[in-house]
Image (cartoon, rainbow, N blue to C red):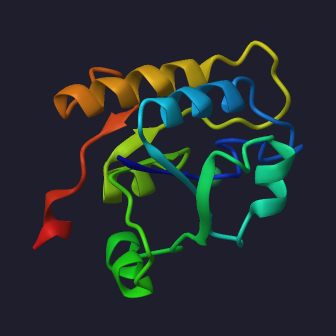
Amino acid sequence: MNIFFDMDYTLIGGIDGSLRPNVQDVMERLKTDGHDLYVWSGVGIRWRDVKRLGIEQLITDCYMKPLSNYYESMKKMELPAEPDMVVDDFPMVASAFGGLCIPAYNVEDKEDRVMERVYNAITDYGNTGHSDDAMYRPRDGWHNS
Ligand SMILES: [Mg+2]
């Protein structure tokens, strides 16, 4: 699957920019499982933060993320790849594309274990087309028409 990750409040602290625990480890496992990983952000192309996270060799590309009218805007951007699943702290993004709405990462918290849950939920979805994790949001059907 093409998995698109948000940056702020998802992979890094939205307030202090700190690195969320286990991002590199979980992305290495997702890559090993055969997924293609992307980072997109509403505020720009985020290679600088991707490098800070130590995941630049794992990320296929970075894109701008639409700020509104998400699915239709993404289609108009004609990106080289489209998400099969997104991981985002913002619920409307997760339901526009289908994916995981994860608890926002605000400031450094060494006990945060959300990325492990992300790995398990992605793996469940990849295997069955569904995840029982409460973070999972199916894609809004009306976008498909
Ligand atoms: Mg975010």
Q: Is residue 119 above or below residue 85?
A: above
Residue drawn 77% across the image and 47% down it: 14
> 5 or 100: which is nearer to us?
5
Q: Position of residue 51 (x, y in %)?
A: 82, 51
Determine the image quadrant of residue 69: bottom left
Q: Is residue 142 above or below residue 4?
A: below
Furthest residue to the left?
145
Residue drawn 44% across the image and 75% down it: 80
Furthest residue to the top?
111
Residue 138 showing in the rendered view: yes
Residue 36 is left or right of residue 11, and the answer is left
Which corner quadrant holds the C terminus? bottom left
Residue 134 showing in the rendered view: no
Residue drawn 63% across the image and 69% down it: 42
Determine the image quadrant of residue 140: bottom left
Residue drawn 41% across the image and 56% down it: 92
Q: Position of residue 22 (x, y in %)?
A: 70, 24
Residue 134 is left or right of residue 61, and the answer is left
Q: Position of residue 111 (x, y in %)?
A: 75, 12
Q: Position of residue 16 (x, y in %)?
A: 89, 43
> 88 or 62: which is nearer to us?
62
Count of residue discs: 0
